[in-house]
Image (spheres, rainbow, N blue to C red):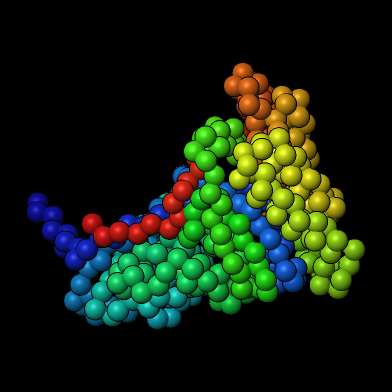
Amino acid sequence: MRHKKEPRPVKVIHARAPIRVNDIGGWTDTWFAGEGKVLNLAVIPGVEVQIKVFENSRHERRRIIVHAENFRETFRMDPDEPSRDPHALLQFTIAGLPVAKEFRLEINLCSPVPAGISTGTSASVCVALLGGLNQLRGKKYGWAEIASLAHRVETEKLEQQSGIQDQICAAHGGVSFIHMRRYPESAVRKVRVEDRVWHELDRRLCLVYLGKPHRSSSMHDYVIAELEAGGPQLEYIRQLAGIAQEAKGYLAAGDFEAYGEAMIRNNECQRGLHSRLIAEEADAVAGLAKTWRAAGWKVNGAGGKGGSMAVLASEDDGLRRQMIQRIHALGKGIRIIPVSLSHAGLEAWEV
């Protein structure tokens, strides 16, 4: 029995974007903060996208097939009429850069890291997907415009709360210092560090998954409402922005002890915003980090139940390995996710 021969794609495009960790100054890159400063790190593995481009000889309307590999789901969509079900984020991102009617696409998306770990993965998905579609359109947009488009998908199309740092980190890469002068406008600077500092940071940085996906909750809504009303939490927002400014100098100078201390102060400022932003599991990991002489630790993203945290381990290899073993021994799904620093941000190319 002969199988029908699959048509050859006109072209194949690949794109990838890193995820974000250790966002010192997080919460200040939001509409309710006024002015903000964030220092974050781009790491891989991140998000990978493959786009196979075919001729749309049958003039199909639902001419996009999406394979969301992490969710083991495949669906078809019309890029001119995106829907909220399934995967509204993917559908509205694809619709953000219109696909010519002469093409039909088969899109594969995958990330080796778990979903919902508070590392800006959804923003990285948007950036990588838009980067691939931008490649298809002839590279009409630069990284800053891609980051802005990705941010608008989440805030305007999906009407979600979103700071600006995740999209910028995914598109920009490296060590990013973001000065938000007025939401969502910002100036972005890549912090240059010596090779020895980069390699040491890469060696000591640990991403700890706290056992379950992060879920936004009523506590986040409460914090936002209090900040919008000018509540006492605003002082913590100011402190967070100041810590990010200091941490930039510490990292550029290779002062890991001061940089780690900035992480800890950031963590406690987040606790000041709401006590439950630092979950019990995060405190358990922080206790082990302290025991094994880690330089610093902080929860990633907004904080709350689940998600992940960044730990800057001891300079001593033996202590670092013992800390990692003890973290794994906590159980409840808590574990280290291997990551590496990434100089590169969004990358897209045609095969």
- Residue at x 76%, y 25% (from the top left corner): 291
Residue toward you, 239 or 91: 239
Q: Residue furthest top?
A: 318
Q: Residue furthest right?
A: 232
Horizontal and vertical percent position of residue 111: 46, 49
Asked if residue 23 is positioned above or below residue 95 in the image, the reply reads: above
Horizontal and vertical percent position of residue 112: 46, 44
Asked if residue 85 is positioned above or below residue 169 in the image, the reply reads: below
- The quadrant in which residue 167 appears is bottom right
Asked if residue 167 is positioned above or below residue 337 in the image, the reply reads: below
Say if residue 316 shows up in the picture.
yes
Horizontal and vertical percent position of residue 266: 76, 48
- Residue at x 40%, y 64% (from the top left corner): 131
* Horizontal side, residue 306 vs residue 21: left or right: right
Horizontal and vertical percent position of residue 162: 64, 66
- Residue at x 54%, y 44% (from the top left corner): 193
* Horizontal side, residue 272 vs residue 90: left or right: right
Say if residue 311 shows up in the picture.
no
* Horizontal side, residue 8 vs residue 194: left or right: left
- Residue at x 44%, y 51% (from the top left corner): 344
Residue toward you, 228 or 69: 228
Residue toward you, 314 or 224: 314
Q: How many marks?
A: 0
- Image quadrant where one finds the C terminus: bottom left
Residue toward you, 43 or 66: 43
